[in-house]
Image: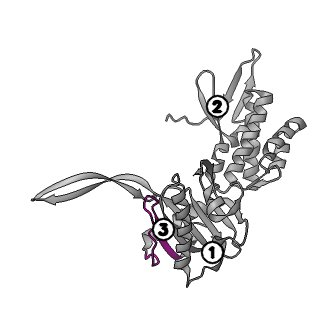
Amino acid sequence: MGKESITLKKVIVHILDSYISMPVLSDKELEYGSDFAEFLKGHIFRLISGDDIKKCYFGREDLTLFETIKAMNEENFIESSKAIATKLFDIMKENGDIPPADLVVCVYNYCDRDNLALLKMNYKSSYTHSTASAEGANNNDIIKYKAILPSEGQKLNEAVIVDLQDFSVRIIEKKYDINGKKDFYLSNKFIGCVAEMSQKTKMNIVTKAVEQVNKKYFEDDFDKQMQAKSIISKEIEDKGCIVVNEVAEKIFMGDPELKEEFTEKVDRYNIANDTIIPQSKTTTRKLEKQHLTLDSGIEIKIPMELYNEQDSIEFITNEDGTMSMIIRNINNIVSK
């Protein structure tokens, strides 16, 4: 399913420019055409199909924002969206590090479930031309706009998605300076929810822990790193997920000490028994190829599906300790 499966039901936009004293709140829902609908659906789908988004749950059900969202309906959608925008603006005014933005509040349907999207579209600066005519002469100029919205191809880095049936929350956020300390203000101060780590973060923790353990015990043995990457890649290919303790057993088979050290590293993040389910190809792309740099300066990229095929590629340790690599069955070489 793609963005075409998203149906927009209600949309309103509020201007949250923290450089002015008050938010500019809209009193009417947004009237939009097909171009903007595609723009909005593209941003929503990119969020819900990516691995940067984190699952959350409301810490307390007596929170004002939770009550506002829970009580939202067709009749009070505009006023509810204003209350949400005002709360976010108040936090932004108190913390100058948070960038100004337009807040798009949208109710949409996807997979037969209604969801509320709070899309914080942070401003960026861009240049464009202007033209003026005076006394029969044209004067063209270049001016800078400071309130340009993200393009359709850009990924939003601040947004909240709330399932309006079970009120589960998904969030993508950045840390900003809050009272002298970097903090996730969207989850901690705005939504008031407890956030899990994203699938992308979990994947990075696992792969980094594997690399650290292998490097500690095998130094620069590239074959160990390639074996580990091959195992992780095959798990995702076969199952569509990684069961952390199972993949650790396969990578460190016969080395309980190494497996225990790996488990200790990932257990610091409480993911030793987790199942990681990546959705986006960008999360797993680095597992698809192994990039080798030889001491001679030669660089080689090996697709992981070919790594275990000796009829395609083979590494040989020579008597003098050097290594040779044989690449077989080459039909064509292209220079890039």
Q: Mark 3: which secondary structure?
A: helix
Please tell me whether residue 19 belongs to the stretch shown in magenta: yes
Q: How is the image coloured?
A: one colour
Q: Earlier in the sequence, mark 2 or mark 3?
A: 3
The residue under label 3 is 38
Q: Earlier in the sequence, mark 3 or mark 1?
A: 3
Q: Is residue 212 left or right of residue 250?
A: left
Q: Which mark is residue 60?
A: none
Please tell me whether residue 240 belongs to the stretch shown in magenta: no
Q: Dot 1: few (<14), some (14–19), or many (≥20) neighbours within 10 Å?
A: some
Q: Is residue 114 above or below residue 210?
A: below
Q: Is residue 141 left or right of residue 309?
A: left
Q: Dot 2: few (<14), some (14–19), or many (≥20) neighbours within 10 Å?
A: some
- Image: magenta residue range: 10-31
Which residue does the image show at 72% across and 42% down from the upper left? 207
Q: Quadrant of residue 171?
A: bottom right
The residue under label 1 is 69
- What amino acid type should be assigned to the residue bearing mark 2? Leu
- What amino acid type should be assigned to the residue bearing mark 3? Glu
Q: Is residue 300 left or right of residue 79?
A: right
Q: Quadrant of residue 66?
A: bottom right
Residues tagged 1 and 2 counted as in contact (Cβ below 8 A): no
Q: Mark 2: which secondary structure?
A: strand
Q: Dot 3: few (<14), some (14–19), or many (≥20) neighbours within 10 Å?
A: some
Which residue does the image show at 52% across and 64% down from the upper left? 89
Q: CA distance from mark 3 to mark 1?
A: 25 Å
Q: Which mark is residue 292?
A: 2
- What amino acid type should be assigned to the residue bearing mark 1? Ile
Residue 175 placed where, x, y %?
60, 51
Residue 88 placed where, x, y %?
55, 64
